[in-house]
């Protein structure tokens, strides 16, 4: 870890890392694993691998990081809007051309290639449309 200086004479910030910012899933491999889990009746594993498949699709469209849903709701509240359910929001983002999926790592998160401002625009547009 390195130390980054800070103006104002206070102590520096300690940086940690590395941070992974590339796709985490190989779509073909995940599809094969899900098929095997289904074949063997491993329901819980199949469900997790299905989430991985959706994440791989979103990653292929640039969705590498995620937003916590509280952050999404706070941004929408500034515009007088409420967050739609994920099963409505994810397809709306996809229709708008963004990668979007649930996150396997954080159940209260949305993985998308949309910026927070773009996500707000999509929700407001759907509300008006």
Image (cartoon, helix red, strand yellow):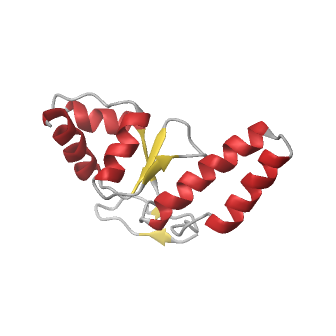
The residue drawn where x is 54% and y is 52% is 54
Q: Where is residue 75 in the image (x, y as percent from the top left)?
A: 25, 38
Q: Position of residue 21 (x, y in %)?
A: 51, 67
The residue drawn where x is 32% and y is 55% is 114
Specify whether residue 79 is in view. Answer: yes
Q: Where is residue 104 in the image (x, y as percent from the top left)?
A: 60, 46
Q: Where is residue 51 in the image (x, y as percent from the top left)?
A: 60, 47
Name the residue at the left extreme.
Answer: 128
Total residue callouts:
0
The C terminus: image quadrant? top left
The residue drawn where x is 53% and y is 72% is 2
Name the residue at the front extreme.
Answer: 39
Q: Which of 78 and 48 is in front in this view?
A: 48
Q: Nearer the viewer, residue 62 or 46?
A: 46
Q: In this view, does 6 lie above or below 129?
A: below
Name the residue at the right extreme.
Answer: 40
Q: Quadrant of residue 98?
A: bottom left
Would residue 109 be found to the left or right of residue 42 on screen?
left
Q: In this view, does 72 lie above or below 98?
A: above
Q: Nearer the viewer, residue 121 or 6?
A: 121
Would residue 17 be found to the left or right of residue 73 on screen?
right
The N terminus: image quadrant? bottom right
Q: In which quarter of the image is residue 113?
A: bottom left
Would residue 106 be found to the left or right of residue 87 on screen?
right
Specify whether residue 26 is in view. Answer: no
The residue drawn where x is 55% and y is 60% is 56
């Amino acid at each position: 870890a390195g130390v980054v200086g800070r103006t104002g004479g206070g102590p520096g910030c300690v940086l940690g890392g590395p941070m992974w910012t590339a796709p985490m899933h190989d779509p073909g491999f995940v599809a094969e694993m899900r098929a095997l889990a289904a074949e063997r009746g491993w329901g819980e594993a199949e469900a997790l691998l299905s989430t991985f498949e959706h994440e791989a699709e979103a990653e292929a469209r640039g969705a590498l990081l995620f937003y916590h849903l509280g952050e999404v709701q706070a941004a929408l509240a500034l515009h007088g809007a409420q967050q739609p359910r994920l099963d409505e929001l994810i397809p709306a983002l996809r229709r708008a051309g963004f990668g979007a999926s649930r996150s396997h790592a954080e159940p209260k998160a949305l993985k998308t290639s949309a910026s927070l401002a773009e996500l707000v625009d999509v929700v407001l547009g759907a509300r008006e449309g």
